[in-house]
Image: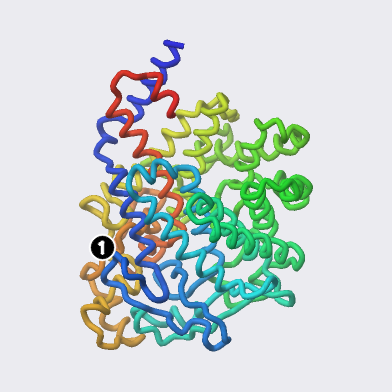
Amino acid sequence: MENRIALFFFTLLTFFTPKSLAIDYADALTKSLLYFESQRSGRLPYNQRISWRDHSGLTDGLEQGVDLVGGYYDAGDHVKFGLPMAFTVTMLSWGVLESRQQIAAASELEHALEAIKWGTDYFIKAHTSPNVLWAEVGDGDTDHYCWQRPEDMTTSRRAYRIDENNPGSDLAGETAAAMAAASMVFKSTNRHYSHLLLHHAQQLFEFGDKYRGKYDSSLGVVKGYYTSVSGFMDELLWGAMWLYRATDNEKYLKYVIENAHGFGGIGWAITEFSWDVKYAGIQIMASKLLGEAKHKQHSQTLLQYRSKAEFYLCSILNKHNSNNTSVVHTPGGLIYIREWNNMQHVSTAAFLLTFYSDFLRESNQNLNCREGTVRHEELLRFAKSQVDYILGSNPMNMSYMVGYGSNYPQRVHHRGASIVSYRENKGFIGCTQGYDNWYGRQDPNPNLLVGALVGGPDFEDKFVDSRENFMQTEACTYNTAPLVGVFAKLLALEEQSQSHDGDDQQLVASY
């Protein structure tokens, strides 16, 4: 036992090297949650901390006779896209479920709950009847012709919905997952709200499962923006998995088991986890069920889920013995999936690696890759390297989280941040005026989009800080959302390593 404790401390204390001590995870956590306040649509609350924003989208849904005020703008535009918004809320909720104690210790739990509730309040409004879910407000085509502040919006605010005749199982499944995950978050602090969210989650899942179809087949308006390339089967498995976790009702687990093969859960070996592709998340959640005695009857299927989860993790770690199945890393060590907004894949990978590392440690297991056995410490170490890269430990010495550190993107592709604040200048700024006077300016943005994780560098670690370089400088809510729980986890580990007072047993018990 003494040798194991000594080895643990050697690992922990070398994990947080002097170089990494310059990374301020507490500051990163605080700023990551501030970002969601910049993306709010609707009537802003009295405690709004991002002062350059004001009320917007106050007539959303009015044309259709429904109240759709609220929710989040997904990125640098002003369309409210349901699928990425729901995934954002799912990941925020999952982060709180995994790191609630650590987030609370950093005095950020209230802000995390507010960020989740801003999304779920909107989903409640958008789910106007059991088989109706409003999927989008605004039009990407007209919105992208316009460069103006959200407070000045003159573009279409038409709302689009899925229903029995226009199905969208992917959107319904993801929104069910978001509300089920959030119901667990609020269970200890607001039982009535938690119950309400769970009720909506169950109805949405039943709707999505009964009336099957891709939402972009029903709503052509989303194509070119958030096309559901992976289809809807992953979201139905994802929704069922979250409902099983939220309710402990065997019917949801039975759904995940019985549809494992037909829906691709144990068939698809995927190297990304994103707003579109949920398989890796499902597979990792299923893997964690293996150690519980009550799931013994499903062990064969769960083992197959775990095999695909390990494929994802080993691919990210570059621990396959084939270049065809390993994810490319840049010379600076960053995961590189694709050119457009690569950081979304980095943040989700860091999340899954961090919390699967916890699972391996707690269950005294290792990750089995083709190149050999990988201990839980290595997963956490690699996740930390990705987070540290994001925060400035990279060849450009650039923090890709806006507002963090001394060198970060100044010209984020974001309408509201790039134009003088409405609170400073209430004079109307039209679509073409925004393009003529603000979009092409070489000056830094007048408003700081604190906590935004931009698309990031290319495969050679190069980054061009230009508003027109939207593949690298646009930020999205689903980029930052997975980092909230990870920042809190790394902060807690760092603080415990720094404050170690010789009580080895206590620290080992904590982590």
Tell me what residue is drawn at x 35 percent, y 70 percent: 45
| Residue found at x 52% / y 27% | 374
Q: Is residue 372 visible?
A: no
Across and down, in percent, residue 447 comes to: 25, 69
Q: In which quarter of the image is residue 442?
A: bottom left
Q: Which amino acid does label 1 sit on?
A: Gln
Quadrant of the snapshot with the C terminus:
top left
Q: Where is residue 27 in the image (x, y as percent from the top left)?
A: 28, 48
Left or right: 494 with respect to 172?
Answer: left
Q: Is mark 1 on a helix, strand or loop?
A: loop
Q: Which of 279 and 462 is in front in this view?
A: 279
Total number of numbered discs in the rendering: 1
Decide if residue 23 is in sight here.
yes
Q: Where is residue 175 in the image (x, y as percent from the top left)?
A: 59, 62
Mark 1: few, some, or many residues within 10 Å (few <14, many ≥20)?
many
Q: Which residue is drawn at 33% across and 87% down?
A: 430
Q: Which colour scheme is used?
A: rainbow
Horizontal placement of 290 versus 328: left or right?
right
* Image spot of residue 186 (x, y percent): 51, 54
Mark 1 lies on residue? 410
Looking at the image, is 52 positioned above or below residue 57? above
Position of residue 346 in the picture relative to residue 241 (left or right) = left
Apparent side of residue 34 relative to residue 352 in the rendered image (left or right) = left
Along the line of sight, which residue is nearer the eye, 218 or 413? 218
Quadrant of the image occupied by residue 403: bottom left
**At x 33% / y 53%, what residue is drawn?**
400
Nearer to me, 323 or 490 = 490
Please state which of residues 208 and 374 is positioned toward the viewer in this rendering.
Answer: 208
Relative to 132, does residue 14 appear above or below in the rendering? above
Quarter-of-image position of residue 266: top right
